[in-house]
Image: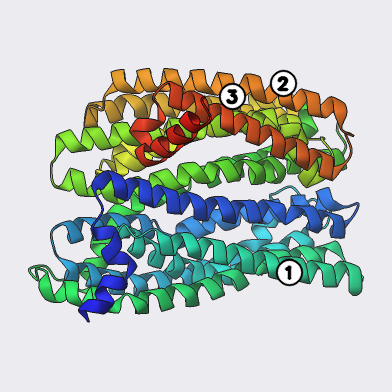
Amino acid sequence: MLNKTKQNKFSKVENLSTNEKMLHGTAWLSIGLLISRIIGALYIIPWSRWIGEHYNVANGLYALAYAPYILFLDIATAGFPLAITKQISQLNARGEYKASMSLFKNSMLIMIGLGAFSCLTFYGLADYIASISVVPTGNVNDSVLILRSLAPAILIIPPISLLRGFFQGFQQMTTPALSQILEQVVRVSYMLGATFYIMKIAKGSLVEAVSQSTFAAFIGAFVTLIFLLFELYKERYYIFEKIKLGKQTVSFSILDSFKLVLKDSIPFVVMSTGTSLLALIDNFSYNGIMNEFSTMTKDEIANSFAWFSANAAKLTNIVGSITMAITASAIPNIAALYHRKDKKQLSLAVTKDIELLCFLVIPSAIGLFIVSNAIYAVFYGSIDGAHVLKIFCINLIITGFFSMFVSIIQSTGKHMIAIKSLSILLLSKLTFTLILTAIFKENGPGLSSVVATILATIYLFDELFKLTKFDTTYIIKKTTNIIFATLAMTAVSLIIYNILVILLPANNNMANLFIVFITAIFGGLTYIYFTLKLNIMDSILPKQALQFRRLLKKWNL
């Protein structure tokens, strides 16, 4: 048993330092999320070609279904995965491994029940949701079909989320990361295979193709569930030994588990629905505002709706996955430090988390902004709508801070602060959506999200400082250096990008892909060079900084 224990992933993570666990977790979750998001974006290229001339209608139909689907997933999981991550981390820190396992088992039964209830409710409400939303095809029955094709996925994704939360509670991020990649590979494979058959072989309709594309979420989830259960089975020796050697002073009945996790999960689910609610505000308001304040036709409104609700959202999700990885890695670490009342280490951990976010997200968002026209053309065949993507790129930075601050605050149990920030976010979004969409048309939803997120983030920054006393002087100094390195990267990237745009054909996918790739390489290398010269990377990624410095010395740079 001991030999088997030594070989598993849990025991390897256990031997790492606090900072190493954070970097290890962030690296794996970033890899998993980035690859899964890239796959989730790249499928658009063949999918759009096979759908044909009505791609914008199909994409609008797809986006229409996904906004309420994500909201129902948030409700179905009820914040349990994040709550489980926090509770298991705290119990493990106290050596209560038997209690953490009991909590996990009981919570799994609850999640299965919630998944079934949410699945049936979503299926039943499909008619109503379709009736109050934008209707891309002009036929509300098409929207109902697409919505209902997503219902089966809601049944099994809650248990999957709980399993990921369990692994993350042990600060073992490798398995959740691999499961995300697997889920996307299976989902996209089924999606593309079904779409090719329907559109190219069977000569079917775009509605049939979209319905199978959305049903692919269930196929991907089912395979992922099998994978996670198998990985959990492989860790049984480690868990059994921990239970045997650990404390056994706490026990949980299913009712105790429900009460404990529900207390934590309600604030988590309220916060996790924030992004979905922002999207739904746009879903339900955009059509009416544009009919009232613009001269666009119904088709033009449907197309412009897809620009921000589907196209821009898919591309920014790739960079947004970095924020998700950092925040997911921070939760178990912050929860354990706060539980131990280690104020000094808590302040240091929060400071480092913010530094890591700035280091990764600021240059990534600006880089996407620079190549937005080219990358948009690669995925969608033209630059119509690329101007909307630029606004979403800026919002990536602000949303990154908002998400991190909320996650850290919730990790400490201060849920009312998080809920107040969500109230500011939603009220601001509601207020500014009407005004800014009426004035700036399809740019309005993105601009209103920027304004709303800034206001909510300012409030959170102040509350987080009061709670953790993180080192603002250090963060200002490091952020200033990061901004300087990003400006240098921006200057080089713009020069390379504009030269390539002049030299290469504009309406060629391979040319645009080449422009994105070369610009990213030169921009990335410039950023790395300046972060080394300004001693930024050394405090964040010391091992990698040392390796890069050896290369620079070798090249006399």
- For image coordinates 84% across by 72% down, the residue present is 197
Kindly report the distance in space between the C-alpha atoms of the residues bearing marks 1 and 2: 43 Å
Residue 298 position in % (x across, y down): 85, 41
- The local crowd at label 1, few if under 14, some if 14 to 19, many if 20 or more residues have their Cα within 10 Å, is many
Left or right of 393, for residue 476: left
Q: Nearer the viewer, residue 313 or 148?
A: 313
Q: CA distance from mark 1 to mark 3?
A: 42 Å
Give the position of the N terminus as an image quadrant.
bottom left
Answer left or right for 225 relative to 105: right
Mark 1 in CB contact with mark 3 (< 8 angstroms):
no
Total labels drawn? 3
Between 105 and 315, the one nearer to me in the picture: 315
* Position of residue 316 measured from the top left corner of the image (x, y, whole percent): 61, 40
State the CA–CA distance, disc 2 to disc 3.
Answer: 10 Å
Q: Which residue is mark 1?
A: 212
Q: Position of residue 199 (x, y in %)?
A: 87, 67
Q: Nearer the viewer, mark 1 or mark 2?
A: 2
* Dot placed on the residue nearer the N-terminal end, 1 or 3: 1
The kind of secondary structure element at disc 3 is helix
What element does badge 2 sit on? helix
Q: Secondary structure at mark 1?
A: helix
Residue 475 placement: quadrant: top left
- Three-letter amino acid code of the residue under disc 2: Ile
Q: Amino acid at mark 3?
A: Met
Pair 1/3: label in front: 3
Q: For the point 54% across and 24% down, which residue is it?
A: 451
Q: Nearer the viewer, residue 525 or 207?
A: 525
For mark 3, what is the residue? 489
Query: In the picture, residue 435 is in which quadrant?
Result: top right
- Mark number, residue 495: 2
